[in-house]
Image: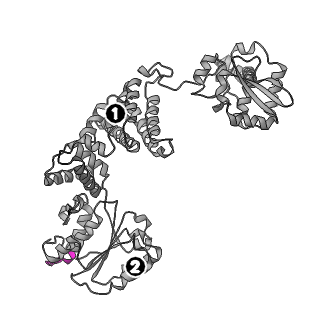
Amino acid sequence: MSYMALARRYRPRSFDEVLGQPSVVRALRNALDGDSLHPALLLSGTRGVGKTTLARILAKALNCETGVGSNPCGECGACREIDEGRFVDLLEIDAASRTKVEDTRAMLDNVQYAPVRGRYKIYLIDEVHMLSGHSFNALLKTLEEPPDHVKFVLATTDPQKLPVTVLSRCLQLHLRALPEATVVSLLDKVLEAEGRESEPDAVALLAEAADGSMRDALSLLDQAVAHAGGGKLEGQAIGEMLGLGGQKALVQSLQAIAAGDGAALRAALQELAEMAVDHGALLDDLASLLQAVAFTQAFGQSAAEGARGQEATALAPKLATADVQVFYDMAVHARRDLAWAPSARIGFEMALLRMWCFRAGAVEGAPEGGATGQSSEPAAAPTTAAPAASAASTTESAPIEAAPEALATPSPADLDDAPSAAARAWHERIEAATLEAYARELARNCVVGFEDDDELVLQLAEDMQHLLRDERLARLREAFGKAVRIDCVRQLGDWTPTRILRAERARALDAAGERLEASPVFRALNARLGAELPREDIRLLH
């Protein structure tokens, strides 16, 4: 069974068939027709854009039996042999597998000999940046002054790795990635030539997945044909083949975010979780969709074609312009940080949930979210002493150990009584002890229940038990040099060090306010302009 891949079968055989590289083709044509072709050419560009193909066409143009020119006949013996890969004077060298200087010297030993079959001997060195430093040094002299019958064509995907001494001896021609429309046009022609039917969305998905590489596009088309069997190439099937089966649910997620519908967003995320999708590719797709939406909002029409363009047009009026810009940034950053997420699914879902939280019009604490019962923004951390039920509902979103410096002013009820001498002694003892931040914060929220020479029993409010961790308890044992046990109780009978700190902070704020109001500058402003001093705006610097 002999089958030639589509990428080989539809490889361009002449300059006229080369797509997407007009400037490079024009330069080569003019050089050939004007008999001024540089002896060393460097073709650079990403994979699958035509570097090797152009080198072979160039070899035909130089060795065609009808004469040197930009239009080789394609019918003579030399042209056919080059197309079939058996022309003796076209030496294709894979630099990735022949990196040693000995390989380069063996090649150069044969440069001086005249061509066997053609007019010129062509050395095509693919992935030339893989050569060693000594290989490049050995090549320099011959590259600068080759014999008249020799032409060098160097091809690379990474020209930055080439020494400047090599670059200065070559005529560099950069091949750009192919536009998506060009890839779609070629795929349509190939499908027509192969007698296969396809949906426009299917071809568009293949062209987008190729990412500017014609060889990748034809290889994916080979895969799509095998996937479809003898049937029609359908967009949904191609999407599943490419791991993009969640496109519909992805659009539904953005629609739910735009509408503030938490139930719909949760359903869409659940649907995506049940699919075997590539979440990294889905984040790329999300960023592309948001770009298309932004383009539509800016210019009134989408830059995307097919289903993507229709989706962008439908979403554009539903999303705020500023939201689209922020969402795109979130999608790109989520894709970058995907490797650090616990799983790809979690990283993807957090990106969408972040968009949900920061969408325009979301009101903190508003009972949005439909059936989910969740608010549109994270719950704010409590700033005053709260009942146990309220504290339990907020500690998960804003744990106290995350912001020990942001101690709020206590309510008047907190100041009605005063801490006992034992509470103050415990507070001073903690502040004097050598404790890391989290262990200190745990101790600050406890009161002493019992203590003897061997054991220290602390009491912790039930609504603060999220602070209790084994490693923090171990730090307390080390600091106090005895066994430490912490019991969780419903209500504490004395002031905790945290409460004492809040009270001291409140007194310091009051004293600062009184000093500011008593200052001559404020008195003058008050007398002349009626200035007032909002006490809630006063902040301590230490």
Tell me if residue 381 comes above or below residue 229 in the rendering: above
Q: In which quarter of the image is residue 21?
A: bottom left
Q: Name the residue under label 1.
A: 249
Residue 260 visible in rendering:
no
Q: Residue 149 carries which label?
A: none
Q: Residue at x 39, y 28 (%)?
A: 265
In the picture, measured across the screen, residue 330 lies left or right of residue 49, that is: right
Tell me if residue 79 comes above or below residue 240 in the rendering: below
**Residue 66 belongs to the span the image colors magenta:** yes
**SS at mark 1?**
helix
Q: Which residue is drawn at 80% across and 22% down?
A: 423
Please report whichever mark, 1 or 2, sits nearer to the chain's N-terminal start: 2
Q: In which quarter of the image is the C terminus?
A: top right
In the picture, measured across the screen, residue 165 lies left or right of residue 460, that is: left
Q: 511 or 41, which is in the foreground?
A: 41
Q: Which residue is drawn at 82% across and 34% down?
A: 482
Q: Residue 104 carries which label?
A: 2
Instruction: State the predominant SS element of the stretch in magenta.
Output: loop
Magenta stretch: give its range.
61-68
> What's under tag 2, amino acid-wise?
Thr
Rendering coords of residue 403 (x, y %): 64, 31
